[in-house]
Amino acid sequence: MSKSLKKAEQEHIANAVGAVINQMKDNPETANVVFKADSTLSKGLQADVSIRQFKLVSDEPKSLGGTDMGPNPVELILGAFAACQEIVIAAYASVLGIPLEQVKVTAEGEVDLRGFFNVSDKVRPGFKNITFNTEITTSEEDPEKLEQIKFFALNRCPVLDILENPVPTEGTITFEPVTSEVSA
């Protein structure tokens, strides 16, 4: 990818981010947005997930009873976190005029399967811990700008915030009767 294309990409991102910031300053009510995902279990442990116009498959590995047709839900969370880190860094770098060559995030999470499989009620079913490494390749040398990017990556990443802080969650579980079709 050429430098001019990267510069054009950064300008596009900076303009879009600036426009959203200005819109929220002018109309604070536009700051609250709702994101939505729908999922339907299609077969075995495979779920067909719809997010906006995108379709993806989530499944468990064969060792956990799945068919390994896609990443499992906890892997999707790690992928969402890694992507969010990269997006936050690219957005703020664009606004600050910091050139980026590459941003790469590796995230790992440890799960004690005794919680998921109800072997122990003393073990949570989710991650015990998550570790990550974010590598930013840039020609920027200004230590203040680099510290700003580090601050934003650690303090303005929505998925990191979700992982680190409890989110009020409520929902319902309903049971629908099976409808039998009468054949003529």
Image (cartoon, helix red, strand yellow):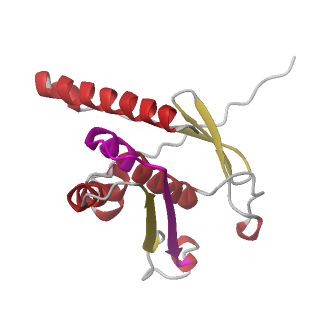
Give the camera-side residue of 6 and 173. 6
Question: Residue 127: horizontal and vertical position, in percent?
Answer: 46, 71
Identify the residue at image location x=42%, y=83%.
122
Quarter of the image that includes the C terminus: top right
Identify the residue at image location x=45%, y=63%.
135
Vertical placement of 162 versus 171: above or below? below
Vertical placement of 157 versus 64: above or below? above
| Residue 56 located left or right of residue 28 | right
Question: Residue 58: horizontal and vertical position, in percent?
Answer: 64, 50
Q: Quadrant of residue 36?
A: top left
Give the camera-side residue of 132 and 146. 146
Vertical placement of 126 versus 150: above or below? below
Total marks in image: 0
Q: Which residues are magenta?
A: 89-112
* Extreme residue toward the top, this view: 184
Residue 94 visible at all? yes
| Residue 153 located left or right of residue 25 | right
Identify the residue at image location x=39%, y=35%.
10
